[in-house]
Each structure stands twice: as C-alpha cells, then as structure tokens.
Amino acid sequence: MKPSIEEIGSLLALKRHERPEEGYFDDFLREFHQRRRAEEARNRGLKGWWKDASAWLGERLTSKWAYGAGLAYAAVMAAFLLSAPSGEQVGNLPATNVGHEIRSVEPIQVEQLQSLDLRPSSEGSTGEQEF
Amino acid sequence: MMSSFWRCLPALVVVSCVIVPGAWADEGWTAAFSTEGGESVSSAFAVGDGRHVVTVALSGSNAGNGQLRFAGRKLPAQVFVDQVSRVVVFRISGPPGKALPLGAGAEPGTAVRSLKGDPATIRDRVKRVNGRILPISMLRVDYGGPVLSPGAPLVDGNGRVMAVAHQEVDARSGYALPVEVVRRVVDDVQRGGRVSRGWIGLKLKPESVVPQVTQVQVGSPSAKAGVRAGDVLLEIGARHLEDYADAANAFYFLKPGTPTPVRVRRGKDEIEVSVVPLEQAK
C-alpha cells in the first residue's frame, strides 16, 4: 500500500523534529579515540619498532658501512651465543671432588733487620723490638 | 829539544795541579775487606779533620779487618765499625787527607753527582727491602752514569756530601746512606773513639700500624721521663714519625747522654717529654 501524500508530509514533519538521544555525541567522540589508540597499539609491535628504529638510524647514519658494521656485530654475537655450551651439556660432565683444608690464619709477622744486610738470604727478627 | 821541555815545564806543573787532586779525591782512597770468596773493595773519602776516612763494608765482608789504601798503598789505621749501618771509619795517624764537607741531608728529588761529575738523582726514601723493615731508612738513587761502588760519596753542586753509595740494586740504581748516618758515626768516633748506640727502654711491634709503645722497661730512661705503654710516638728529636719504620730510624740517631724531646699521643692529648738515652749494652 502506497502512503498518501498527506501521510508522507506528516512523516517528514515528524523526522524534522527528531533528535539523537542524550550523550550521543560524547559517546561518539570517546569511541573514535578508543579505536585510534587500538590502531596505534597494533602498529607498535615488532613491525612498528623496526619502522621507528629504521627512521631513527636513517636520520643519523648515512653510510651503508654503518649498516654493514651493525649487521656484522649482530652476526658475531649470534654466533657466540649459539656456540656457548648449553646447560644440558654442562650438567652431563662428570663431577670431580675438590680437596680442601681449613687452616687457622697465622698473625702476620713482620721482620726487622738489625743491620743493613740487604742480601735476600739475610734474616731479621720478629715480635716486639726493644730500643 | 831540552830547551822546549823546560819551556813547557810550568804549563805541565799547572795542569798536574788541577787534574791530580781531583783524581785522588775520587780514586785515591779505597778500603779492602776480606770475604769468603776473597776480597771486596769499597771507595772511601776523608771527612772532618782529614784524618778520618769513611767507607761502607757490605754484608758478607769482614768489616773489622778492613785495610785502608791510598793510591794503591796500604796505610796503617784504626778501624771503627758501625754494625747497623755497615759504615766503617778509619783513623789515620799520618798527614791528613783532603776532607769533603758533609751536607745537611738530601730529600727525594735532589740532584747529586759523583766526584767524577756523573749525575744522579735521589729517587725516594726506602724503609723496607724485600718486605723487611730497615733499621735505618735509606735512599734509592738513580744514576746517570755507572752505579757507584759502596762507600763512594754523592755530592751536591757545592761539593758537600749528601749521601754515600751502599748496595747496587740494578745497572742504573742503588741504595745509599743518608749523610746524617755518616755524621752520626763520625761524631761518635771523633768524640768518644767508638761507635755507641742509645737505649731508652721502649718496646714496639713492627706489625703495628702506628708506632705505639707496647711496653716500657721499669727504671728505663723512658719510664723516668713518663712514657707509658699505649702511647703513640709522634716525634723523636726533630724526626716526625708515621709508622714503625720511622721510629726504628729515629732510635738509631739517639745519642747516649743527650736529652732528646719525645712527643707522644696519649688518648686525645699530646704530651712532650725529654728522654736521656743510656748507652746500649753490647
């Protein structure tokens, strides 16, 4: 059934006075910012970090050799870390008993020469000295 | 030919008068000491009235039977030995030799020279050798020329003796005795005809960080002066003490019968007393 001209006119008049509910625009703004932050967080992952680092290095290092040196350093460090013995390998080594003895510490005795006999074989006296 | 010789004679005499005494002062006096392997020869030099000749007999040599020589000729002399420093003084009865004046003492950094003119520098004071405390602080000398033989004097720009070479350390340095040690021994020999040691009756431990008195002998000069066990020695005579080695060095210079000011720290107080050393029994 097609609406009549009067009905359409009434409907348009009704729509002209229609308003969004209270707080609609505040919610819209909040939702907009939330979505924007979520998008930024996704970009901040490994890809985002690499992008930032590249941009930072690009500002400072113009030489291709600098990139080369950095990559070489990273390769050497990776090789070093990969070649280190694993905990499992160390754990499989046979245990060795280490002999030890606890001794009481003797007080330090300082020698005093009684004459200027500077030969290495000369002996001085220790303990209290009388003058 | 003969006439030209007579014409040159005055010039030869003048040249001889300039050169020969210098050579004699350096190489004229020597002293020989017997050792297990043979003989050790030290340099020597005359001091004071010219009838006292000083040298050093290194360890291992028999200091008491030293023989004085001048230009290779043996000279009869009385021998006095300080067993602590190994300084030997010969007293001659013949005509006096040319005496070298004794200086005031050399501090580290002082430039000195041998009698031949080779430069040397006093590097520092040595209180220990091979970890052992010395009874007298010595000097370490860096030589610009050859290391001097024991007993050779090191003089300042005015020809005053500042130190006496002792034992060689390496090809460029050696130990030397401060001149005050020589003065101490020579004064004793000239005045009393023997080498004496002062005794004040204090006991100290070499391993102490500070020179603290551990014991005072009853009736000793220190006890009479009022020194107590526990006192920390700060000064003996004009010598400032920082450690045990400084104290041992200062005790060497005590003269029997000569009042000596001794400053000590007792608790928070500093006290000065006068101690009259007795002669140490041998």
Image: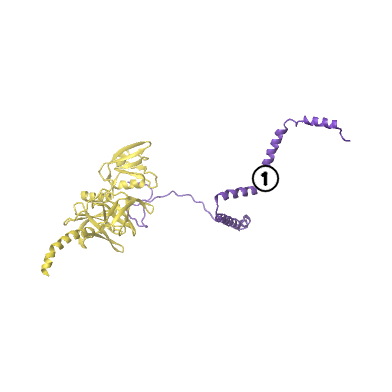
Chain colours: A purple, B yellow
Question: Where is residue B263 drawn, in percent x and y?
Answer: 32, 39
Question: Where is residue B147 drawn, in percent x and y?
Answer: 31, 58
Secondary element at tag 1: helix
Figure quadrant of the N terminus of chain A: top right
Amino acid at circle 1 = Arg
Q: Nearer the viewer, residue B33 or B237?
A: B237
Q: Nearer the viewer, residue B95 or A125?
A: B95
Q: Is residue B99 left or right of residue A43?
A: left
Question: Where is residue B22 drawn, in percent x and y?
Answer: 21, 58
Q: Is residue B141 above or below residue B276?
A: below
Question: Where is residue B18 drawn, in percent x and y?
Answer: 18, 59
Query: Going by the picture, which residue comes out furthest to the right?
Result: A1
Residue A33: quadrant of the picture? top right
- The residue lying at 55 percent from left, 54 percent from top is A63
Query: Going by the picture, which residue comes out furthest to the bottom?
Result: B1
**Residue where numbered disc 1 is placed:** A42
Q: Is residue A41 above or below residue B156?
A: above
Q: Nearer the viewer, residue A37 or A78?
A: A37
* Badge 1 density bin: few <14, some 14–19, many ≥20, Cα 10 Å: few
Numbered circles on residues, count = 1
Q: Is residue B200 above or below residue B144?
A: above
- The residue lying at 17 percent from left, 59 percent from top is B17
- The residue lying at 34 percent from left, 46 percent from top is B246
Residue B31: quadrant of the picture? bottom left
Query: Going by the picture, which residue comes out furthest to the left?
Result: B3
The chain holding disc 1 is A
- The residue lying at 27 percent from left, 59 percent from top is B42
Q: Is residue B195 visible?
A: no
Residue B239: quadrant of the picture? top left
Q: Is residue B235 visible?
A: yes
Q: Is residue A23 left or right of residue B73?
A: right
